[in-house]
Image (spheres, grey):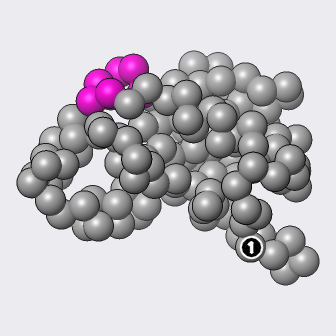
Amino acid sequence: MLKGFLPMPPDEGPPLPRGLQVRWPGTGITELKLRELIDQVPDLNEPDVICYWVEVGDKLVYLEGWCDKCLISTGFPTMERGNHQEKIAYIEDITELTLERKTKPKENPYGKELKLIRGGFEELPYAENLYGVSYGIYEK
């Protein structure tokens, strides 16, 4: 299930089951479309290839895959050596800061202030190299 860190209005309820064509309020992007974008992030241990921006209608989506090379400076062992849940918790903790930083003109390829509408982290337990993908939906 997609997890978002931005507060949801009380009447919105929990995230929806996989595959529903429901638009997230204020984004104009369906959950299914966001899942497609997340699934397209290459399952590679190459940070330069797994972090990028996509334009979807009048919104910008930032996708940041998380692999062992992304975590090399943290002191965590490789995927094969364990500490999986600790790594996931670490990634979830820094996702909000990372996505907020991307709103700054010097931190995005558009060179202007962006407004973060919604963001979160999706764990990918089926992937061989990725722990998951952080995503942010921004207004242009």
Whether residue 113 appears in this view of the structure is: no
Towards the viewer: 13 or 101: 13
- Based on the displayed image, in which of its 4 quarters is residue 6 positioned? bottom right
| Mark 1, other Cα within 10 Å: few <14 / some 14–19 / many ≥20 | few
Position in image of residue 4 (x %, y %)? 63, 61
Residue 116 magenta-highlighted: no
Residue 129 drawn above or below residue 76: above
Total count of labels: 1
Say above or below: 96 vs 62: below
Position of the N terminus by quadrant: bottom right
Image position of 5 (left or right of 86): right
Question: Which range of residues does the magenta coloring cover?
Answer: 44-50
Residue 123, visible in the rendered structure: yes
Q: Main secondary structure of the magenta part?
A: loop
Instruction: Determine the secondary structure under disc 1.
Output: loop
Residue beneath the point at 63% across and 52% down:
119
Query: 132 or 25: which is nearer to us?
Result: 132
x and y percentages locating residue 22 in the rendered image? 87, 52
Q: Is residue 46 magenta?
A: yes
What residue would you read off at disc 1? 14
At horizontal 40% and vertical 53% (from top left) the residue drawn is: 125
